Amino acid sequence: MKIVSQYNVNVNLCTVLFCVVLLFSACDYVPQQSPSLAVNPASPLVSVDRGGFDQVIARKAGKVVLVDFWASWCPPCQHAFPHTVQLYQQLQDKGLTVVSVSLDSAADQEKAQYFLDSVGATFENLICTQDNAIEIFEIPDAIPYYTLYDRQGRLRYRFSPLFTDGSQGETPASIDQRVQELLAE
């Protein structure tokens, strides 16, 4: 009987030690992303006010500029944003550039950058943390919200995929169509 109880103690002790070793070894574990699944890290967020935003748009003269206003706390924004990334990847060689403007608070800037990294947003990424950013950028309804500038820097279109009253706004296909229209000019 003593042999069995000593055996149980040794097994229990070994089990506890194994779990402790496993726990401590897991603390240093950093999962490696598969190279086939890796995305390009996003461009860093740059804080701007309306004047800084206008300067960014002016520097893009000669390109069609799609501006995507979004926030990390906005599920429709998270759903729509990968389309913006894909459109940029497909059409950047034809003259499209994208500027994203996060409307996150300063406290959520890290979350916003994490989201941008997760979708590979390699275009220019801005953040406006001012309390009245919706008013500053004249966003009439809800985000996501888009503006589209022609090659001369003129604002040609303002649109949203979904309005706060629930009605459907622009679809991804119609956004693509408007971008193609300006690229053809």
Image (cartoon, rainbow, N blue to C red):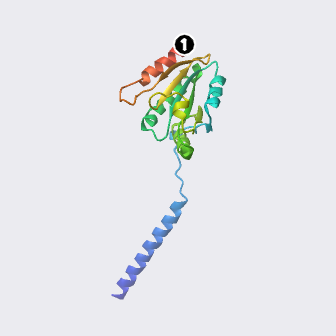
> Could you say which is closer to the camera, residue 109 or residue 129?
129
Residue at the bottom extreme of this rendering: 2
Residue 118: percent from left, percent from top: 51, 40
> Could you say which is closer to the camera, residue 1 or residue 56?
56
Q: Secondary structure at mark 1?
A: helix
Left or right relative to 82: residue 3: left
Instruction: Tell me which residue sits at (46%, 37%) in the image.
Output: 78
Residue 179: percent from left, percent from top: 51, 19
Residue at the top extreme of this rendering: 185
Label 1 neighbour load within 10 Å: few <14, some 14-19, many 20+ = few
Residue 124: percent from left, percent from top: 60, 32
Instruction: Tell me which residue sits at (36%, 84%) in the image.
Output: 5
Which quadrant of the figure has residue 6?
bottom left
> Could you say which is closer to the camera, residue 110 or residue 158?
158
Instruction: Tell me which residue sits at (59%, 22%) in the image.
Output: 93
Amino acid, disc 1: Ala
Residue 65: percent from left, percent from top: 57, 23
Left or right relative to 2: residue 95: right
Residue position marked by numbered label 1 in the rendering: 184
Residue at the left extreme of this rendering: 1
Q: Quadrant of the N terminus?
A: bottom left
Instruction: Tell me which residue sits at (55%, 33%) in the image.
Output: 101
